[in-house]
Amino acid sequence: MSNLYSKIHFISILNTVLRLIYVFFLAKILGSELYGLLAYGQSWYLALLPFAALGLGSVLSISVGRKDESSKETTELVLAARIISISTLAFVSFILAFVYEADSQTFTLLCIFSIALIGKGASSWAVTMFQAYERSKNILKMEKRFRPIELICGLCVAYFTENIIYIAANHSFFMCAQGVYSIALVKAKIGSIKPNWNMKLITSMVYSVLPLALASPFSQFLLQGPILLLKSFGGSLTMVGNLALSMQGFVILNLLFSSVGTAVVPVLSRANKKDERNIEVYTRHAIKITVVLGVCTALVGAIFAKNIILFIFPEGFELAANYIGILLLALVPAIGKNLLRSVLITRKKFKTILFADTVGVLALFLCCYYMIQDLQYLGIIIAILAGYSSSAFIVFIAVLRVQKIKVRGDISIQLISLVLVLILYFGLLSNFEIREAALVTFTVYLIVLFVCKIITWEEIEIASRIIRRKSK
C-alpha cells in the first residue's frame, strides 16, 4: 500500500513538473500578454473548483472506511451533492463571465473554461471515490492516459495557431474526456452508483462539514486569487502574465511540502489516540522545516531564478525575473501553514482553519485594493506575502495553544533567526541586486544554522538516509 501511495505521489509531482514545462513553452510561444489572459481564464475556473467538493471527501472516506450500512447511502448522497455543486458552479461561472467581462475574447475564454470545470469536477469526484474505496491505483490510470496527451496537443495547438481560444478548447476537451472516462472507470471498478436526491439529507451532510467546505476554496484562492485580483484592480495583461509565470514555480515548490502535510494526517490521527507526544514532536519538526527549508528554498530560488527566467524569456517577463526573489519568501508562511494545519485537522479544529484562511484572503484582497494602483506589480507581491503570512500566523498561534507549546528554547531561536534573516535580506536589497543579496543572506544563514545548532550534521545524515531509502 505504501508503495502505491508513493507511486501516486510521484505521478502527482511528475504531472506538476510536466505542467511547469508546458507553461514555460506556452509563455515562450504566446508572450506575456496572451499568456496572461490564458492564465487569467485558468485561474478563474480553478478558483471555483474547490467549491464543488463541499468538503464531502472526508465524510465519504469515514463512512466507507467503517463499512457500515450507511456507506451506500452516503456514497449516493455525495454523488448527488457533487452533481448539484458542479452544475451550479458552471452556471455561476457563465453568468459572472457574462456580467463582468465586456471583452468578447475574454468572455469566450471564460465560457470554455466553465465547460472544463464540469469535466474537472467529474474526475475529482472519481478521485475521491477511489481514495475512499482504497482503489487508488485507478487514479494512476486516469492521469497517465490523459495528462501527457493533453500537454502535447496543447503545445502543438499553441505552436501552430498561437490562439488562446484554441488552447483553452483543447484543455476543456481533455478535461471533459477525462471526466467521462473517470465516471466509467468508477462504474467498472466500484459499481454503478445512483444519486440520492434527498435534499434534507444532502443539506444536513454538507452543513456538518461546512467550515472545512469553505476553508478549502479560501485556501485555494490564496494561490489563484492573486492573478484574478491583479487583473480586476487594473493590472495590465503583461503584469498578469508575469505573475502567472512566477506563481508556477511557487506552486510546484509549495506542492512538495503540502503533500507532506497531507500524508501525515492519518499518522497523526492514530497518534492522537495512542501517544500525545508524537503530535508534539511532529509540530516541532514542522516548525523547523518551515523556517529552515522555507528560508533556504526561497533564497536559493532568488539566487538562480532571475537568470533562468531571463535566459528562457529574453523579452516580456522582466517583472517576473526582477521580483521572483521577493515572491519566493511567501514560501515560508505557505509551507508553515500547510504543515501545521495537519495538526488542526487531526484535532478537528475546522473553524480555526476556516478563520485563518478567511483572514488570509481578506489580507490579500485589501492589499490588492490599496496597493496595486500605486505600487503596480510590487503591490500584488506584497499582497501575496500579506495573505500567506497572516493566515500562517493564525495557524501557528492556534497550534501552539492546542498543543500547549511555549515559544522558548529551539522554537524561539528558529523564529529569531527567521526575523534576522529577513531584516538582513531586505537591508541588502536596498543596495544590491536580488541575486547578490540572496547569496550573502544564504551564506550568513547557513553559518547561523550550524553555529546556533538549529540543525546538526546528524539530522542531515538521517534525512539523507530517509531520502535514499524512499528513492529505492
Image (cartoon, helix red, strand yellow):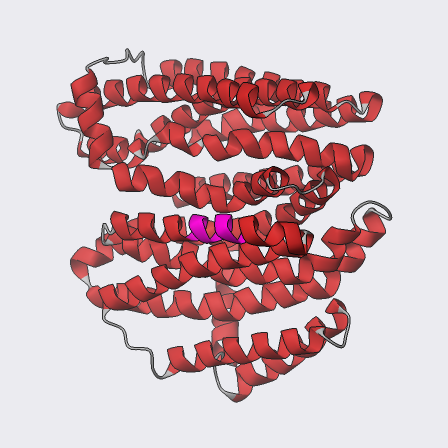
Kindly identify the residue that appears in the image at 40 percent across and 65 percent down: 286
Let me know if residue 135 appears in the view: no
**In the rendered image, the vertical position of residue 434 relative to residue 331, given as above or below:** below
Residue 41 lies, in percent from the top left, at: 61, 29
**In the rendered image, the vertical position of residue 189 relative to residue 356, given as above or below:** above
Closest to the observer, 426 or 66: 426
Kindly identify the residue that appears in the image at 16 percent across and 20 percent down: 200
Q: Does residue 363 show up magenta in the picture?
A: yes
Span highlighted in magenta in the image:
360-367
Magenta span: chief secondary structure: helix
Which image quadrant for residue 211? top left
Residue 172 lies, in percent from the top left, at: 59, 19
Q: Quadrant of the N terminus?
A: top left
Closest to the observer, 433 or 171: 433
Q: Does residue 259 show up magenta in the picture?
A: no
Instruction: Judge left or right: residue 228 versus residue 60.
Output: right
Instruction: Judge left or right: residue 166 versus residue 274.
Output: right
Residue 31 lies, in percent from the top left, at: 80, 37
Instruction: Judge left or right: residue 142 versus residue 429.
Output: left
Let me know if residue 351 appears in the view: yes
Extreme residue in the right direction: 314
